[in-house]
Amino acid sequence: MTTSPRIFKLNFVGDVMLGRLIDQLFPTHVDEPEDAAHAANFVRSRPQLKTYNHSTPWGTTHSLFLSGDLNLINLETSVTTTSNKWPDKVFNYRMHPNNIAALNAARIDYASCANNHTLDFCEEGLVNTVRTLKREGIAFAGAGESRDEATRPAVLQLPRRCNVKGEKPVEASDSSHQVHVYSASDHPQDWESVPSFHLIDYSSSTRARLKQLLIQSNKTTPSPSLKVFSVHWGPNYSWHPSANIRSLAHFLVDECGVDIIHGHSSHHIQGVEVYKRSLIIYGCGDFVDDYALDEEYRNNMSAVWRVDVEEDGMKLKPKRLEVFPTVIRAFQAQRLDVGEKGHGWVCQKIRNLSSYNDTIFEKDLDAEGQMVLNV
């Protein structure tokens, strides 16, 4: 009897910033009097924030995470109680280590640490961040306690190895698949001096090094079923990725065997590209944060980007992308329903931006109001 190929659902989102005002809304938080005062003002005007807890940031998107086989985010904050800020930086974000429970509330399996806030509280804050993730069993890449840890991939398993307390772990078996997730950032350049942060640029030397990391390492370790590259790239507020970014994305597929590129950093949604059966999400947008609204780029609107991957022999290949539009309201992510203000804008913007990459979504929305792209 022939067994049908299994399909797994991977949820990707962009920046998850649980520091600053959001951290102050949790019962335990870091000591930041100015942030505490601002948070108190919001609580006075929005009494529902008095019950803000570790599930609240996920709002009505929570069920999507609970139904996903793997959940991957960019963690846009340090996780530390140290107060030693990186000098001359405009924004320094941190959350109390106890509030890592918010990631467990949404069954987050992977957090990218290669971004422009991991070192906001210097190397001590970085070490605190990765040790907290280790303690909670949340995989990470892009930064670490050593250069090797920062550049090597996070190794995930499908079916997932459970990291939720009280649930029985799934043991690896002959039918399991390994997913390798690499992470890097192209900014800030000041952090080039920190060996435990994975900084990249668009030079030929960086390409050679990435190829060594992503291809040559497979000679000493088993080749994964799926390879993901999670990357914090490009400037804030630019609808289209630069030629350098698109070229690097194609290189990662052509020369490094990457199946899915999880792009973030722009503070708003960008387009998608299907390239040689690989999927490139150039910018996932801000998923949850306390940022001011930019009226042009609408940085409060984003999505859960759900990728179905299907067994193809010993490998997993992207089969379908579903995009569930979301909005940030009162420091939490909310799904946008069809006909609700903002839903049409998110869908049309993603369609238009993706068409520049010769990538066309299905005309009709699916049953839950999500956009569909068949890879």
Image (cartoon, rainbow, N blue to C red):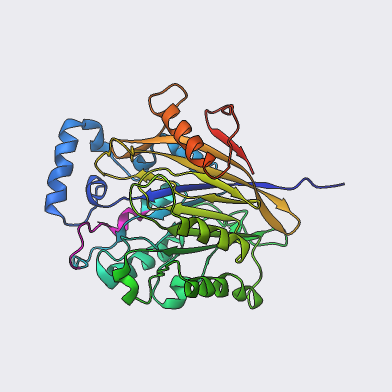
94 up-or-down from 131: above or below: above
| Residue 161 falls inside the magenta stretch | no
57 up-or-down from 243: above or below: above
- What residue is drawn where x is 76% and y is 56%? 313
Residue 375, how many percent across, how many down?
Answer: 64, 44
- What residue is drawn where x is 31% and y is 36%? 296
Residue 93, how many percent across, how many down?
Answer: 25, 57
Left or right: where 209 falls relative to 60: right
Which image quadrant is residue 160 in?
A: bottom right
Q: Can you see residue 97?
A: yes
Which image quadrant is residue 219 in?
A: bottom right
Closer-to-camera residue (100/352):
352
Left or right: where 293 falls relative to 174: left
Residue 220, how many percent across, how many down?
Answer: 64, 78
Left or right: where 14 falls relative to 361: left
195 up-or-down from 40: above or below: below
Residue 306, how many percent across, how many down?
Answer: 54, 43
Closer-to-camera residue (300/99):
300
Q: Can you see residue 164?
A: no
- What residue is drawn where x is 28% and y is 35%? 295
- What residue is drawn where x is 45% and y is 66%? 202
Closer-to-camera residue (145/300):
300
Give the number of marks: 0
| Residue 93 falls inside the magenta stretch | yes
Magenta extent? 87-100
